[in-house]
Image: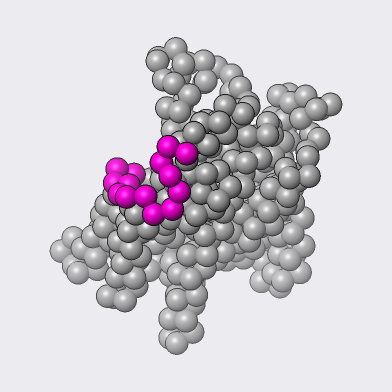
Amino acid sequence: MATAEGDTWKAHLAILMVQFFYGVYQVITKVALNDGVNQLVFCVYRDFIALTIVAPIAFFQERRTRPPITKKLLMSFFFLGLTGMFGNQLLFLVGLSYTNPTCAAAIQPAVSVFTFLFAVMMGIERVNLLRYEGLAKVGGILICVSGAILMVFYRGPVLIGYTIMGHEAQSEITRRGHPEPSGWLINGLRDIGLDQFQQGVIFLIGNSMCMAVFLAIQAPLLKKYPASLSITAYSFFFGVLLVVIVSFFMTNWSTDWIFKQSEILAVVYSGIIASALNYGLITWSNKILGPALVALYMPLQPAFAALPSQIFLGSPIFLGRYNSPLIVIDACLSNLIKGLQPTNLLTKCKG
């Protein structure tokens, strides 16, 4: 019992670290995108680096506990790669190239809502509003979303930086950006009157939905296949396979695949930290906490992205960016301390 409680606290801390690493990733990646990096090529390099790190570790560490592979499991791994690696990452990069890190981070709380809805529809999360646990779960989600909405609509006074200078700096960076054309979808969004920023928001919402599907379908898979590192490695394998196939037809091999030194540093951080480490921690935490609680921490990304965004992009920091996350932290701690039982798939597997 003590070990289970210890793992629960470690999982909460791990997901908190994941949000910090993602906040830094959004700013570093935005700088690289402003230099004209091709999003598809960026995904190839990022996921390939992550695959070369996670696959060997999973092979040796889980060689005695890894269940045999079946066709059904391979299809599940493929779907994880399609949603969590290919769709999630590519839509995020395209959306980020059309917007900014603050906007990208502010939309991530949608993952919490989508994940909760998908988990309930799939029967992974059970909500009984007649019991305290069910009310606490729904209340935690509502408080978390309220904090996220407050982050978006309430900025408050400027804590660091200047509004005019920050706006001018961000506008200059946006003008230097070179987002890749996304074919018929971009043309369709443009035809219905959506400007570049609004198109970016649409892509970021799609990114949030892909991440939510990834978390929701990964949770029951971990019950059948408890080797979390191997699941992450297979997901990266299929994600790399998909993005390489698409890149073969949609990139210029003579120019798009050559990166500058600063862009290489962004890819290395993305591959090692944002992909290998973060996805490993997410999968492990998903096995212990369940998809709803894992997604509950997503609204913290705006706070973690604010400071590096101000340093590297000149964006001002507003009081609302740091006041609102306190509401999110309170919701997460309430779920943990007040008796909300996570979806512990390890316990279910043993029992």
Judging depth in this view, the residue of 293 and 146 nearest the camera is 146
Q: Residue furthest bottom?
A: 2
Q: Which residues are magenta?
A: 152-165
- In the visual, does 329 lie left or right of 45? left
Count the marks.
0
Q: Is residue 161 magenta?
A: yes
Seen at 57% across and 33% down, the residue is 173
Judging depth in this view, the residue of 276 and 228 nearest the camera is 276
Seen at 79% across and 34% down, the residue is 257
Residue 217, x across and y down, in percent: 48, 51
- In the visual, does 116 lie left or right of 191? left
Residue 169, x across and y down, in percent: 53, 36
| Quadrant that contains the C terminus | bottom left
Judging depth in this view, the residue of 316 and 35 nearest the camera is 316
Residue 238, x across and y down, in percent: 67, 44
Residue 128, x across and y down, in percent: 22, 61
Q: Residue furthest top?
A: 191
Seen at 72% across and 71% down, the residue is 61
Q: Quadrant of residue 292?
A: bottom left
Q: Is residue 194 above or below residue 212?
A: above
Q: How is the image coloured?
A: one colour
Judging depth in this view, the residue of 39 and 32 nearest the camera is 32
- Note whether residue 202 is visible: yes
Q: Is residue 21 magenta?
A: no
- In the visual, does 324 lie left or right of 255? left
Seen at 68% across and 34% down, the residue is 35
| Quadrant that contains the N terminus | bottom left
Q: Residue furthest right?
A: 254
Q: Quadrant of residue 247?
A: top right
- Note whether residue 120 is visible: no
